[in-house]
Image (cartoon, coloured by chain):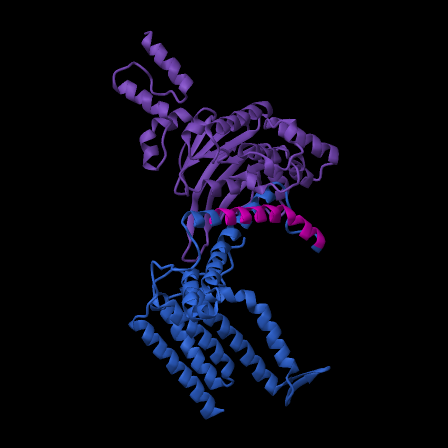
Chain colours: A blue, B purple
Amino acid sequence: MLKDITLGQYYQTDSVIHRLDPRVKLVATLAFIISLFIVNSFWGYLIAAVFLVVMIRLSHVPFKFMVRGMKAIVFLLVVAGVFNLFLTPGEAVVSFWKLQITKEGIKQALLMSGRLCFLIIGSSIMTLTTTPNQLTDALEKLLGPLKKIHVPVHEIAMMMSIALRFIPILLEETDKIMKAQIARGADFESGNLITKAKNLVPLLVPLFISAFRRANDLAMAMEARCYRGGEGRTKMKPLHYEKRDYLAYGMLVLYLILIVAEKLVLE
Amino acid sequence: MSIILDHVSHTYEEGTAMEFHALKDINLVIPDGQFIGLIGHTGSGKSTLIQHLNGLLKPTSGHVYYNGADIHDTDYNRKELRSKVGLVFQYPEHQLFEMDVFTDVCFGPKNLGLDKKEVELRAYQALKQVGLEDEYFYQSPFDLSGGQKRRVAIAGVLAMKPDVLILDEPTAGLDPKGRDEILDQVAAFRKETGMTVILVSHSMEDVAKYVDRIIVMNKGEVLMDQIPKEVFKRYKELEEVGLAAPQVTYIMHALKDKGMPVSADATTIEEARLEILHALHR
């Protein structure tokens, strides 16, 4: 039932992108997102699209799989598109009743939905090719300098990785409890909002109990292995940059230069 | 009155890289009143199979019939089906949620839309059937021991008065005493009500004593479907799929190989005892 969520999921396969240092992917994704907000013209989008297509090809993740994750944001896309289409002032193309579609509106709507699509696909390339653990490792390493000003970087990263790790477990648990209660005649679908909320009690109570039980077990297991926070802790697989990572940084810089150049020359 | 599975296949995550064929072309007839053991290694598809029997999962291809009607027909009342085919999941104590034991057991019959008196009567009967003493009725289910919680959960399904009861590993995580108690209780209320019981397990030892028929699953297929004696005769095949016959089977075979005039058919310790005594006095 709940297995159709692909947003933020990891796709197991082997590719150059999968093997990249997670720090590169994190930085590149951030840079890509920022670049999307810089560009405002057709040519800029073309550069971004080419960059994106190359990344998708390199990642060996089927494009179909990425699109499936987009279903969740179709509604958002439509709303953003419609608002931009009707509410941008400018030269009118079509007008009826109190609404009018302007030339600027069409342009704005297209750019806006394009930007959203690129944003989702760009960040899903990162999550599809990087395990949550790698991501938190990268975050911990990148935020490392903040330790100097007493930010509990390790603890934040640990909390993040535990939270991410528990999402699939709790989803599975929800599915199981839901089925068990349906087998006892529970109804999670019909009724109005209030009855629906009431009917969730047989699902939520066991779910909370199980979450607390798991948290307890995990804390115990961590303490049994002498976990005491990040102080003096070493890693089994420390992150270090290799040739391909520098190459990837080079490509990213090239892309950013192209985007900025386009902005300066053509706009 | 029976459950029929006709060419049932089930595939998880169809069309993705994680595609997994959990069931492959299963054909089974489950007549009324049988006590069936469904055995298989972890991942053999037994849990997927039982979820098809009450319509929680829909076959990717094939049909499931209950009393002659296809349970996935658009106008079929699957809610009623679930009260007729009761399914107790693995670790059923994880589904308890009410403030006290009695109210929790009432949840099932209450969902059937029965009146309050009938609901409470059924809950009381069900709790008696699983052998829980009155003193626990108004305690929080979370304060009970593991074995007691499991009985409460089983009672929660029994209270719906199903015609077929499916128990998924009802003894997982219990100590030997708790295990025997639960299984004896199941056998007892089956005798009393005449319901069909399907016991899912990966331990032959558990089921050998009770069931009249054993279905062995392996990699999504039915490997054997016979009476226990016949299944245990094929103990070599069972070992190949990661299962084992009961220990007495091995002892009887060893005795026979050493020249003792016993038949190797015995499946329970009691049968084996009589067989050996008989052989000694011959």
Predominant SS along the magenta part: helix
Between B240 and B149, the residue placed more toward the observer is B149
Q: Is residue A216 magenta?
A: yes
Q: Is residue B67 visible?
A: no
What count of labels does the image hold?
Answer: 0
In the image, residue B141 lies at what x, y percent? Answer: 61, 37
Which residue is found at the position 48% from the left and 25% from the top? Answer: B210
Horizontally, residue B16 falls left or right of residue B144, namely left
Q: Is residue B5 magenta?
A: no
Q: Is residue A124 visible?
A: yes
In the image, residue B43 lies at what x, y percent? Answer: 41, 43
Between A192 and B213, the residue placed more toward the observer is A192
Between A163 and B130, the residue placed more toward the observer is A163
In the image, residue B263 lies at what x, y percent? Answer: 33, 17
- The image quarter containing residue A102 is bottom right
Horizontally, residue A180 falls left or right of residue A153, namely right
Picture layout, residue B208 above or below residue A21: above
Which residue is found at the position 44% from the left and 67% from the top? Answer: A139
Picture layout, residue B194 above or below residue A19: above
Which residue is found at the position 71% from the left and 40% from the top? Answer: B113
Picture layout, residue A98 above or below residue B188: below
In the image, residue B233 lies at what x, y percent? Answer: 34, 26
- The image quarter containing residue A265 is bottom left
Q: Residue furthest top?
A: B281
What span is in magenta? Answer: A194-218
